[in-house]
Amino acid sequence: MRPATFFRQSLLWQYILSLLLVALTMLLSYFFVAFMGYKVVALLLLLVVSLLAMVFELKPVLLASGVSALAWNFFFIPPLYKFAIDNPEDALLFIMYFVIATIKGVLSVKLRHAELRAKEEENQKKMLLLYDALFSSLSHELKTPISSVVTATDALRDGLGQLSEAQLLTLIEEIDMAGNRLTQQVGNLLNMSRLESGQVQPHRDWCDVEEITRTCVQPFRHSHPTHDIKLEVSPDFPIYWADRVFVEQILHNLLRNAMEYTPENTQVVISLSSAKGGFQLEVSDDGPGISEEIAPHIFDKFFRSAQASTGGTGLGLAIVKGFAEAMDGSVEFSNRPGGGACFKVYIPAMHTEIQNLTDENDEDTDH
């Protein structure tokens, strides 16, 4: 617990600090009262009470108000060192100080509490809107694959023994695709929950990032044959000390985002390059890009653009940002000059002195 939070939550410490601050102000004022006068001391004490009211609860503030008034009377208002006031003007000044300090303290504390309540209500409203967006999205996103599974299984049951091999394979493929879609959405929700709770900690090991990228690309080539997915790797790309699962999640969500927001017959380029103290992963496309109005929100949870061609929960890019930051990295977005979006992820990581041992020369390098 941070010190400021501790002092706000501990009422005993609030009483102690209130008295200490009043005593310190009195002590300093005592040595300079000859230069500034005892009336200025009242203003300083009033300032201390006001500052306490901005942080502490009501009772410690009222204690500071009462003690400061009595101490001001005893040490500064003639006759000194007595709880008595001979001058009517000083008596009125003393009463005004006590009333003003008390009212100001009470109003400041109540105002602070009202602001906190308003902020909490605003946060609750925002959270309700976020969850409403999530549930609306999930109701659509989960309904489609579930309906596909139900329809395919009904067709399998009703046509058992009558379906051709090609029809059977088609129905099985539909069930498989729907299951993968459900698994992906549930996985995104779990990942977002883990990231928000702070439970995600990287488990680094030596990783062949190029091999991880090739593995992630293949399913997308199969599921999106109309997209031209190209992989570019800088020469002598080394092995890096990173979290394989985190890198896979970043790649998967960036690729799915590219497939979702770009039309058919467009190109998606994945680039791997060494960077100072780590490596950079770049995913770019030649689609429509992202408008300036929505660009500041693309990494927000549950945010979905109207440009999306399919359903989704709006968690993909938020997860990319979360996993990148969990590895002390960063992600940034820009629109390409020639059209399309570009996401650059920087991951700080140690690397080997030898080049990547992957010497595959498959279609990735020239596709």
Image (tube, grey):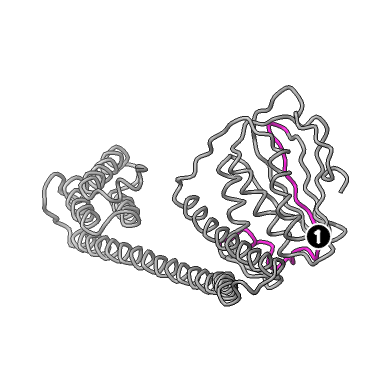
Q: Is residue 366 in sight in this rendering?
A: yes
- Magenta span contains residue 299: yes
Looking at numbered disc 1 in the image, what kind of residue is underneath it?
His
User: Could you tell me residue 230's position as x and y percent?
Assistant: 82, 49
Q: In this view, does 251 lie above or below 140?
A: above
* Quarter occupied by residue 220: bottom right
Identity of the residue furthest to the top in this view: 353
Q: Is residue 303 in sight in this rendering?
A: no
Q: Which of 5 and 209 is in front in this view?
A: 209
- Magenta span contains residue 207: no
* Quarter occupied by residue 244: top right
Q: In this view, does 137 lie above or below 246?
A: below
Relative to 113, 119 lies left or right: right
Residue at 57% of width from left, 70% of height from top?
A: 149
Which residues lie in the magenta part? 276-301
User: Could you tell me residue 315's position as x and y percent?
Assistant: 58, 60
* SS for callout 1: loop
Q: Quadrant of the N terminus?
A: top left
* Quarter occupied by residue 277: top right
User: Could you tell me residue 40's position as x and y percent?
Assistant: 33, 51
Q: Which of 366 and 37 is in front in this view?
A: 366
Q: Which of 289 and 68 is in front in this view?
A: 289
Tell me the residue that label 1 is attached to: 227
Residue at 72% of width from left, 54% of height from top?
A: 333
